[in-house]
Image (cartoon, rainbow, N blue to C red):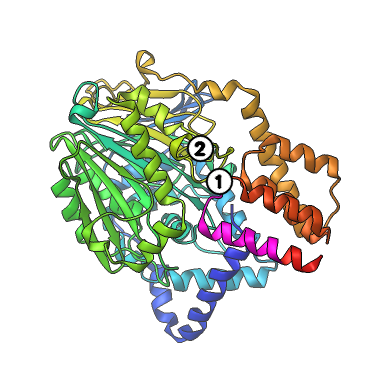
């Protein structure tokens, strides 16, 4: 899940801050002891009824696995009731997800004493987090946390750990080499769609390891306050990264370029969740977001069936902007800001120049124009596209592509019809299954996808190229480990590795790096040159390749 060098860098930054502020321990202690309103918190834990191996019931609440392998969750009630229901119904999934996350964190530090020190650093870093999470969400998180595993109680108590995990998504966005982040989204309406109605699509390219993406939940929530809504999420997480409410308002989030934050405030996913639950127009969404203090930069795309349009709410720790297209019927978003408020923002301008965000934005614009009038099936084709601008061949897994073959999920909305399509594994290549919110939240709820609306799996899924890509991903990890540990790899294996994904620049770079570390500089040069002939992801990657090439020539 994590890159060790990235982890160490943030570890050093936070360690320095921790040592500087060690005498403020009372503030840390207060955050560790904070709990939501005590009324009813200590009641007996509700027990679910297991109907079969993959179906669980608790009063009107239900968790079931569909035939495509996704979990469907329906929950209603006040915050604490919802939390208890989510926790009881999905406790095994929550405990599995927590182990995946915690083990990835703890494996970065070798000894028990360092792990204890790390827990104190994280407590200091999150010392203000509880002040930025509203009482309703605290209660929901508390209810879920009662079902956490007890394996990590020495690190932090279950409720505190659950709260921390809602800020971890933001840290992943700030440290883009810690967790891969490169989401792309669009909205279209009017003459740009086949029926004139609003259509929204997005890829959530948040990669935190294969295990992190194994259990996915389509959650349908009917709160006592606010609007019923759905969101595509993972176990134990109540924030919204992609969702739509019964009023036809949708929310998706795309990371912007951020500083490494030195203190946690409001997690972006909880800002998005509040919008999803309480807003029905873009104006209402903007007002909710404007009041929040955040600690990373993010574009929140909000579309509204009432407004029949979409806007971008662009938030960061020290700035706020809203972007609306003029004289256009579509809106694209990748990982940079577009509003006037960020026109001279140095970090945003550097991201546009040096990263892959502009290329994906340009490709989205290109595909929207090519498709002429959009419908859900054409939206899926755009979100599955693996080529670059002007149909450039990128290889597979290149962040220049809209489909980077690492997405946690992909999703399509028709807000005016209250219909949503969610992708199934792997990535966004499996079928998109469809739901109708009016049916799910009807008096006699139908927690079931609509077969007649299903979008079939991408044909690429059944090709030899896809099989080769999956082999490539497995071999890449082995080669990276061998380079790190200075182990020998046969030339036959390296040649076979190249053949699995030959159009991807990083394939040749890794082979070149292997030869460089083995001091075979002639072969290193050959492979670095081959990498530079491909579509390199970013300016930083290109400069890194040129440095390796220059150093290889010098060492001959």
User: In the image, which residues are magenta?
Assistant: 536-550
**Mark 2 closeness class: few <14, some 14–19, many ≥20 residues within 10 Å:** few
Q: CA distance from mark 1 to mark 2?
A: 8 Å
Query: Which quadrant of the figure contains the C terminus?
Result: bottom right
Q: Is residue 20 visible?
A: yes
Report the side of 172 relative to 291 (left or right).
right
User: Of 262 and 456, which appears nearest the observer?
Assistant: 456
User: Of 489 and 6, which appears nearest the observer?
Assistant: 489
Taking 479 as reference, is 218 above or below it?
Answer: above
Report the residue marked by disc 1.
535
Where disc 1 sits, the SS reads loop
Q: Residue at the location (46% across, 60% down)? A: 171
Q: Earlier in the sequence, mark 1 or mark 2?
A: 2
Q: Residue at the location (30% across, 23% down)? A: 375
Q: Is residue 509 visible?
A: no
Farthest top residue in view:
452
Secondary structure predominantly adopted by residues drawn in magenta = helix
**Mark 1 closeness class: few <14, some 14–19, many ≥20 residues within 10 Å:** some
Taking 486 as reference, is 76 above or below it?
Answer: above
Report the residue marked by disc 2.
392
Taking 529 as reference, is 435 above or below it?
Answer: above
Residue 91's tag is none
- Marks 1 and 2 in Cβ contact (< 8 Å): yes
Say if the magenta span includes residue 84: no
Residue 501, position as x, y percentages in the image: 66, 37
Residue 546, position as x, y percentages in the image: 63, 61
User: Of 510 and 233, which appears nearest the observer?
Assistant: 510
Q: Residue at the location (16% across, 35% down)? A: 308
Say if the magenta span includes residue 549: yes
């Amino acid at each position: 899940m994590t890159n060790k060098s990235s982890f160490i860098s943030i570890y050093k930054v936070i360690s320095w801050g921790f040592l500087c502020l060690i005498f403020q321990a009372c503030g840390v202690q207060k955050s560790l002891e904070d709990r939501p309103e005590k009324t009813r918190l200590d009641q007996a834990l509700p027990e679910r009824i297991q109907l079969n191996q993959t179906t669980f019931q608790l009063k009107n609440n239900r968790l079931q696995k569909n035939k495509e392998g996704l979990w469907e969750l329906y929950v209603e009630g006040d915050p604490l009731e919802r939390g208890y229901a989510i926790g009881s119904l999905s406790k095994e999934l929550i405990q599995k997800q927590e182990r995946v996350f915690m083990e990835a964190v703890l494996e970065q530090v070798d000894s028990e004493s360092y792990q204890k020190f790390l827990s104190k650093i994280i407590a200091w870093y999150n010392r203000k987090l509880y002040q930025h999470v509203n009482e309703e969400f605290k209660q929901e998180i508390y209810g879920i946390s009662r079902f956490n595993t007890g394996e990590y109680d020495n690190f932090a108590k279950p409720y505190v750990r659950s709260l921390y995990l809602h800020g971890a998504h933001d840290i992943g966005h700030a440290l883009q080499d810690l967790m891969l982040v490169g989401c792309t989204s669009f909205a279209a309406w009017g003459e740009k769609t086949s029926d004139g109605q609003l259509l929204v699509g997005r890829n959530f390219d948040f990669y935190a390891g294969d295990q992190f993406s194994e259990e996915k939940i389509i959650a349908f929530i009917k709160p006592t306050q606010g609007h019923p809504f759905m969101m595509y999420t993972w176990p134990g997480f109540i924030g919204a990264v992609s969702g739509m409410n019964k009023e036809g308002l949708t929310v998706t989030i795309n990371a912007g370029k951020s500083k490494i934050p030195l203190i946690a405030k409001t997690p972006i996913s909880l800002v998005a969740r509040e919008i999803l639950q309480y807003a029905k127009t873009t104006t209402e969404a903007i007002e909710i977001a404007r009041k929040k203090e955040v600690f990373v930069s993010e574009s929140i795309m909000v579309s509204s069936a009432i407004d029949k349009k979409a806007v971008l709410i662009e938030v960061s720790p020290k700035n706020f902007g809203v972007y609306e297209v003029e004289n256009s019927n579509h809106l694209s978003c990748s990982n940079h800001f577009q509003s006037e408020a960020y026109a001279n923002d140095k970090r945003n301008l550097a991201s546009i120049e040096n990263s892959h965000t502009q290329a994906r934005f340009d490709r989205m614009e290109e595909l929207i124009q090519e498709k002429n009038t959009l419908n859900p099936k054409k939206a899926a084709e755009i979100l599955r596209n693996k080529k670059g601008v002007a149909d450039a061949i990128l290889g597979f897994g290149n962040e220049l592509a809209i489909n980077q073959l690492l997405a946690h999920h992909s999703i399509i909305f028709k807000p005016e019809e209250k219909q949503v399509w969610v992708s199934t594994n792997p990535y966004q290549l499996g079928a998109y299954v469809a739901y109708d919110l009016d049916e799910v939240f009807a008096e006699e709820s139908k927690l079931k996808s609509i077969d007649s609306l299903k979008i079939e799996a991408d044909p690429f899924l059944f090709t030899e190229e896809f099989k080769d890509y999956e082999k490539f991903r497995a071999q890449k990890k082995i080669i990276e480990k061998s380079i790190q540990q200075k182990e020998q790899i046969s030339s036959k294996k390296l040649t076979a590795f190249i053949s699995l994904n030959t159009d991807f620049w990083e394939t040749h770079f890794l082979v070149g790096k292997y030869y460089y570390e083995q001091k075979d500089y002639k072969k290193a040069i050959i492979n670095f040159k081959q990498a530079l002939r491909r579509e390199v992801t970013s300016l930083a990657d290109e400069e890194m390749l040129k440095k390796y090439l220059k150093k290889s020539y010098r060492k001959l």
